[in-house]
Every structure is written in C-alpha cells, then in structure tokens.
Image (spheres, rainbow, N blue to C red):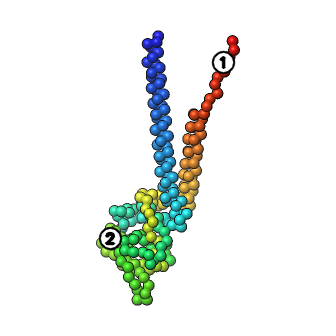
Amino acid sequence: MTTQLAPAAASIATSRRVRSNLRVVGSALGWLVSGLLFLVICASVLVPRVAGATPYTILTGSMTPKYPPGTLMVVRPVDLDRVEVGDVITYQVESGEPTVVTHRVVGVGYRADGERVLTTQGDANKTPDAKPVRAVQVRGELWYAVPWVGHLGVLFSPDQRQRLTYLVAGGLFAYAAGIVVSGWLRNRPRPKARRRMP
C-alpha cells in the first residue's frame, strides 16, 4: 500500500508546485503589464497635463528614422530666444491655424524689423522648409517622445482618450486591489481546529 501511495503523493505535491509557480508567473506578468500601462498613461496624459505640456502625434515620415509616424511627441512651451540649432520644435504652419508641424531647427536668423526667426527641416527631408518660423507660430519644443503610443491618439477623439484613460486607470487600481486582497486571504492566519472531547 505504501509503495502505491508514495507516487500519488509525489504527483499531488508536483501538481501543487506547478500551480503555485503558474500563479507566481501570472501575478508577475500581471504586474508587469499593469506597470507598463501605468507608465504609458503617465507619459502620454498625466505628466503633460501637470507640466503644462501638450502631446502631439507624428503623422508623416518627415522625422524618420528617429521619430517615425505614430510617435507621441510631448511638447512644452519655450521662449524663442532659447531655441537653438538642433532643437526639435512644434509650430503652426500658419499663425492661428490648428495645423502644426514638428521639425528640427537648422538655422536662426532675423527679419528686417529685428524679429528672430527659425529655419526648420524634417530629418528625412532633403531641403529646409520654405517659410521661416516666427515666435507667434511656435507651440513649444520637444520635451520627450514615446514611440507608437501616438497611434492611439489617431484612433480616438480627445473625449474618448480621456474616458479610456479613466477606464484603464480604474481597471489598474481594481486589479491591484484584487491582487492585494487575494494575497491577504491566502496568507491570513487560519484558526486552529479544536479537538472534540470524546
């Protein structure tokens, strides 16, 4: 009898170890995905909002290979006097118009009236942009970029992005709370069974 029970007990122990290892791996993957989603939300929504920056999405290949289409560019306000050759700026094509371009500054000059202007060019373009950029057109300089995240900005409207952000953030907090509660339930001390008196 004992020789038959030993393999069964070993099999049960192995099965428990496998389930325990799978739980640990699943939990680690869950935390990893949650952490990555949280970082993406922070980088694309929370940090720009708190810092007064603006996220834009690269739609064309003019800034490849460093900033391909779909890259989220977070741009913060800048004084035109502090912009130098080599900086990446986002500016309005025409002052007051919503269409913007993100290109690199390749030259700094002055108009006849003394106003400072910038010459820009896309990294993948062979020639500089035709019109110089004035201070009134500049929306800001590149602060940081997040690859591929900008594709979400193209798929969703601003209101949908905000609702999606709240939904994902709420889901992450609910998931984290679920993991904490399930861990507490598994590890809480269990009351000892009392022996019944004969």
Does residue 174 show up?
yes
Q: Residue at x 56, y 37 (%)?
A: 183
Q: Is residue 179 above or below residue 198?
A: below
Front position among marks 2 and 1: 1
Does residue 129 show up?
no
Can you tell which quarter of the image residue 121 is in? Answer: bottom left
Q: Is residue 115 above or below residue 71?
A: below
Q: Which residue is mark 2?
A: 125
Q: Which residue is mark 1?
A: 195
- Residue 4 in the image: x percent, y percent? 44, 13
Query: In the rendered structure, which amino acid carries the disc numbered 2?
Result: Asn
SS state under label 1: loop
Q: Is residue 89 left or right of residue 193?
A: left
SS state under label 2: loop
- Residue 40 in the image: x percent, y percent? 48, 55
Can you tell which quarter of the image residue 91 is in? Answer: bottom left
